[in-house]
Amino acid sequence: MKKTGFGLLVLLLPLFVITHQVQAAPADALRVDYHQWKLGKDGIRQEMSYSELLYRKPDSLWIEREIPEAAQHSHDDHHHGGLGHKHADVTGAPLWIVRDPQGKLDVKLIDRHEQRMIEIAEAYYSNVGFDGHWVESWSLADPETLQKLKPTKISENGLETYEIQRGTQQITLVWNPEGQYAQSITAKDSQGLSGRTIRASEITAPKTLPWTQLGNYLSRDYSDLLD
Amino acid sequence: MKRSFLSGAILSCAAAMTINTVAAAEAKNIIFFLGDGMGPVTQTAARIYAGEKAGLAVPETHKLAMEKLGYAARIKTYSEDAQTTDSAPGMASYITGSKSKNEVISMTPDTNPNDASGNAYQVNGDSTCPATGNGQAVETLLETLKAKSYGTGIVSTTRITHATPATTYAHICNRNAENTIAAQMVPNGAGYNTKLGTDGMDVVLGGGRRHFLPTTVSGGRRTDSRNLVEEMKTAGYTYVSTGTELSAVNLANTNKLLGLFNASDLNYDLDRVKSSINEPSLADMTKAAIQVLSRNQKGYFLMVEGGRIDHALHGTNAKRALEDTLAFDAAIKAAVESVDLSNTLIIVTADHDHVMAFNGYSKIGNPILGLMRDYVSGNPTKDKQGKPFTTLVFGNGGGPREATRAELLEADVLADDYLQEVGVKLGSAGSETHGGGDVRLTAGGAGSQRFKGTLNNTDIHGLIKQAMGL
């Protein structure tokens, strides 16, 4: 009996995990903090960090860089700065990505200053910092890939930890199956010359989602950013 | 003796006049190829890239069609108010012989694109240029030749209302007023440029349908409710909107041809081929234009723009820039093979450079889009942080959004969507700037011997007129 009971538990555990994933409501808003560092052979260590807000619905994703107030000021100055020939400044502008039932993506860059929705065709994805991967953008990691791996640890609250070796990179990923997002991803190279950390935390979604407030925005396309 | 001397002088003078007259009559037709933003580095890189594609053991030895033209010059490109020009005055200088300020389309040097507060003289594609007190139109070479009954045509991979093609047929204080620019080409419509005669240009092929269609039509941007496509058809134009439709046109019986193949710019050539998009290649459009125009017994003017080279460079996407440069070169090759060079002048140049740089010291035959490999060891060259880098990089631009340099792999940097690294990070997508360095010009065919040395972009207009006896 004991043996059977143990066997049953083993059999049920994956089912429990899957059920847990299916029934839980994914987090609809995240704050994601990015941090990177590297150490050059000149001995200089460079660090970089920034944060983004993610608002998520099953087929809609809003990614918005947080621009601190002081930087926002210079950002706006730059926007108006100078006369004559210049390109529109949409640095860090929000991206709104919608997936249709066939999986086709509609990517828009939102230029709040000029009140424009800029349609981004696939050839220009990389120019706006989108790699074309819906799932990785929505969840920060691909859960299907993770399902093929065995977690090294499952915490009491269900968080799954994965240890992954990719080339010289040692990656530790903590997956939140309830919220359907990677809660943290830490990568560092075996020589200790570079590292990267992504940490996501759930936040309260705005009462009015940003993509519902674009009624007056002009529809434009990427070619409008070029001369 | 005296009489003999005088006779000799008269003879010499007559001989000289004859030579001048012969020289002046050399070119019946002019085809002006403009590679937008195709600076020297882009041209060199495209040459090597073409050599790689051709499977040459030493790709660096390859020659582009534009490099097989017999004469070459170096062109200074500054505009009236900027060391580094944009496409509007860059092309207008060639086509009018006059400098103008950045953003201005074929107007006198005193014309301003913005008001005193810096607000552009255009709103959503409609001109707000003052009717008076802000410069005058400057006659373009196309207009000059139209007045003399030559055939006239323009071909571009950008919107046909975009700066480069617009400089040939329109005059406006701000290049972004593309709705107004479109109206200038519609014979006898409101806003028509009467210098295009009673019947307008003969061939117009490119993108930019949105500036011909009203906002009530999907994708249209005209705010005046006009449908310029319908107006052009009424004016006698055969209209096509796909590559298939263009190939089905009986060009032998077509005198007026309008092709608008995209709402905005045509697709990059890489994507057009890879995704089998139903748009004509630049070579196809060029051949079609030549076929229509060459029936004009007087001769013709044709402008062909490889306009998306510039756009890919703005995006620091070297691969698409090189692919579009090769598509541009294929159009030049097609033209050279289609015309009689004894009466046709072919000019190939750029309006300005970009800030793409060619790093040293890669070994011979190293893939031009690949990681740099040292010419002695053949190993990837590393930066001070021990990371490899590519041969082609940019002095500034949006570049990849990664704030720190990633560990680059060969497969990554050869990918279609790879964006080269940039020195000065400007952040915004497509924000890489034009470069202020000189560009190349090559010329072949009738009257091409004039095009040599270091020239100002405004000199070209006069030299073309000389070659055509104007």
Image (cartoon, coloured by chain):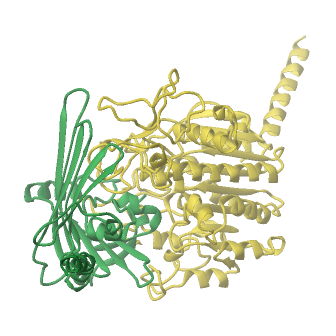
Residue B212 x, y percent position in the rendering: 53, 78
Q: Which tint was used for chain B?
A: yellow
Which quarter of the picture shows residue A211?
bottom left
Residue pushed farthest front?
A1
Work out which quarter of the rendered image holds the N terminus of chain A and state it.
bottom left
Image position of B360 with respect to A104: above or below? above
Q: Nearer the viewer, residue B454 or A52?
A: A52
Residue A73 figure quarter? bottom left
Q: Residue furthest bottom?
A: B216
Q: Residue at x 59, y 28 (%)?
A: B364
Query: Where does the C terminus of chain A fall, quadrant-wise?
Result: bottom left
Kindly identify the residue that appears in the image at 48 percent across and 53 percent down. B312
Residue A95 percent across, percent down from the top left = 29, 69
Q: Is residue B197 left or right of residue A4?
A: right
Relative to residue B331, is residue B214 drawn left or right? left
Which hue belongs to chain A? green
Residue B322 placed where, x, y %?
56, 48
Q: Nearer the viewer, residue B356 or B183?
A: B356
x, y percentage for residue A69?
8, 59
| Left or right relative to B388: residue B138 | right
Task: Using the rendered image of the protein, determine whether residue A118 is visible from the camera's viewpoint.
Answer: yes
Residue in the picture at 22% in, 37% down: A192
Compared to B326, does B235 lie above or below?
below
The residue lying furthest to the top in this view is: B1
Residue A109 visible within the image:
no
